Image (cartoon, rainbow, N blue to C red):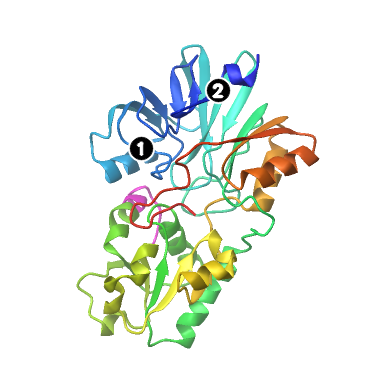
């Protein structure tokens, strides 16, 4: 059995014709298995959607109740038989509800990672390594320059700036699903107990995280707060809001941005970011290469990101590897809520 007989690339993305489903399709299909709720992977309009309960809930928050013809919640580790193919979902460690999807037929296992990270995150289930024959990996930060380091050290930078400039507001650009909630949890782990303010775009998803038992401490909405009240505070907002008129309500704001892309200082300067915070919800170069090796897969399919570098690295390790050119991943706009 060749892997291409189980999963193949189509115009809609990765397809299992034998099981009659697509994984994270980029256009409407009859049956979609969704790895997580970021909009470059989770789109509305499918006939049926299978995903974790959290991913389904988050899709409803973003797209409304009728985002798909039907839905089915899948638990981590639960085996589903789909037209002779066995499918299981496993934690991906990316955001709440994120999953890798393992597809098995005729003794061959292929794992589609979706987006993932293999470092601790208090807001979602940790990444679970799944041994497989073929591993489909993301490659968002698949260059050796991208080594994210300790997120605790980045939070310490933010708190140090707050102590040095107690009269100024600190605005932290972060994506509304996953990154915002992780930042809040990291701040709480560091001992910061003051209320954290939220841009309106952050509120519904953050409250959903709380409903799933994620403790985030005291949170307040920015709307209604006066300028004096916001001095010396931290506000989480979409990255696009940092340079919008909305930011003028804050006293002499310090603009921060939490992203793996902040490793590239020129990018931070171009975006007017005074305090770049290298915190990512994707695996860095070391995380990607370590995960690829640990899966035991002898064939690697690489998608959305720095594909060529990771394909080359695989080749130097004797692994068969190829890029998957899937248009539409890593392109979530949605008011600045891309997934880096």
Which residue is nearer to you in this view: 173 or 329? 329
Residue under the image location 46 percent in, 36 percent down = 35
Left or right position of 229 against 24: left
Left or right position of 39 against 282: left
Residue 43 disc label:
1
Numbered circles on residues, count: 2
- The answer to whether 206 is drawn above or below residue 4 in the figure is below
Residue under the image location 45 percent in, 57 percent down = 179
Residue 176 x, y percent position in the rendering = 37, 56
Residue 337 x, y percent position in the rendering = 39, 55
Element marked by disc 2: loop
Residue 256 x, y percent position in the rendering = 45, 72
Left or right position of 299 against 181: right
| Outermost residue, left side | 224
Residue under the image location 54 percent in, 65 percent down = 262
The reply to whether residue 190 is in sight is no
Residue under the image location 49 percent in, 24 percent down = 15
Q: In which quarter of the image is the N terminus?
A: top right
Residue where numbered disc 2 is placed: 7
Q: In which quarter of the image is residue 202?
A: bottom left
The reply to whether residue 64 is in sight is yes
Distance between the alpha carbons at the discs numbered 2 and 1: 20 Å
Element marked by disc 1: loop
Q: What stretch is highlighted in magenta?
A: 208-216
Tell me the crowding category of disc 2: few under 14, some 14 to 19, or many 20 or more residues within 10 angstroms, Cα based: many
Residue 238 disc label:
none
Tell me the crowding category of disc 1: few under 14, some 14 to 19, or many 20 or more residues within 10 angstroms, Cα based: many
- The answer to whether 24 is drawn above or below residue 237 in the figure is above
- The answer to whether 332 is drawn above or below residue 129 in the figure is below
Of the numbered discs 2 and 1, the one sitting upstream in the chain is 2
Which residue is nearer to you in this view: 224 or 325? 325
Residue 332 x, y percent position in the rendering = 41, 49
């Amino acid at each position: 059995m060749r892997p291409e007989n189980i999963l193949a690339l189509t115009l809609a993305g990765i397809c299992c014709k034998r099981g009659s489903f697509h994984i994270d399709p980029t256009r409407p299909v009859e049956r979609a298995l969704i790895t997580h709720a970021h909009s470059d992977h989770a789109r509305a309009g499918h006939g049926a959607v299978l995903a974790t309960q959290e991913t389904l809930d988050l899709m409803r928050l973003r797209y409304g109740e009728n985002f798909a013809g039907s839905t089915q919640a899948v638990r981590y580790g639960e085996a589903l038989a789909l037209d002779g193919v066995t499918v299981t979902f496993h934690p991906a460690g990316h955001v709440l509800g994120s999953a890798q999807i393992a597809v098995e037929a005729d003794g061959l296992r292929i794992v589609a990672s979706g987006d993932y990270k293999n470092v601790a995150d208090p807001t979602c289930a940790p990444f679970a390594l799944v041994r497989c024959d073929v591993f489909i990996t993301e490659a968002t930060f698949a260059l050796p320059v991208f080594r994210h380091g300790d997120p605790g050290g980045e939070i310490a930078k933010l708190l140090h700036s707050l102590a040095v400039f107690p009269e100024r507001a600190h605005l932290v650009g972060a994506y509304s699903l996953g990154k915002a909630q992780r930042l809040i949890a990291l701040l709480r782990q560091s001992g910061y107990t003051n209320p954290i303010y939220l841009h309106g775009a952050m509120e519904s998803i953050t409250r959903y995280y709380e409903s799933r038992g994620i403790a985030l401490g005291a949170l307040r909405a920015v709307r209604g707060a006066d300028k004096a009240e916001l001095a010396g505070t931290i506000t989480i907002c979409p990255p696009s809001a940092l340079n919008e008129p909305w930011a003028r309500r804050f006293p002499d704001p310090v603009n921060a941005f939490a992203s793996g892309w902040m490793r590239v200082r020129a990018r931070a300067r171009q975006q007017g970011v005074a305090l770049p915070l290298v915190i990512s919800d994707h695996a860095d170069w070391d995380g990607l290469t370590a995960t690829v090796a640990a899966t035991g897969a002898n064939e690697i399919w690489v998608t959305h990101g720095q594909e060529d570098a990771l394909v080359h690295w695989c080749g130097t390790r004797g692994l068969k590897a190829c890029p998957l050119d899937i248009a539409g991943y890593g392109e979530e706009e949605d008011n600045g809520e891309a997934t880096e």
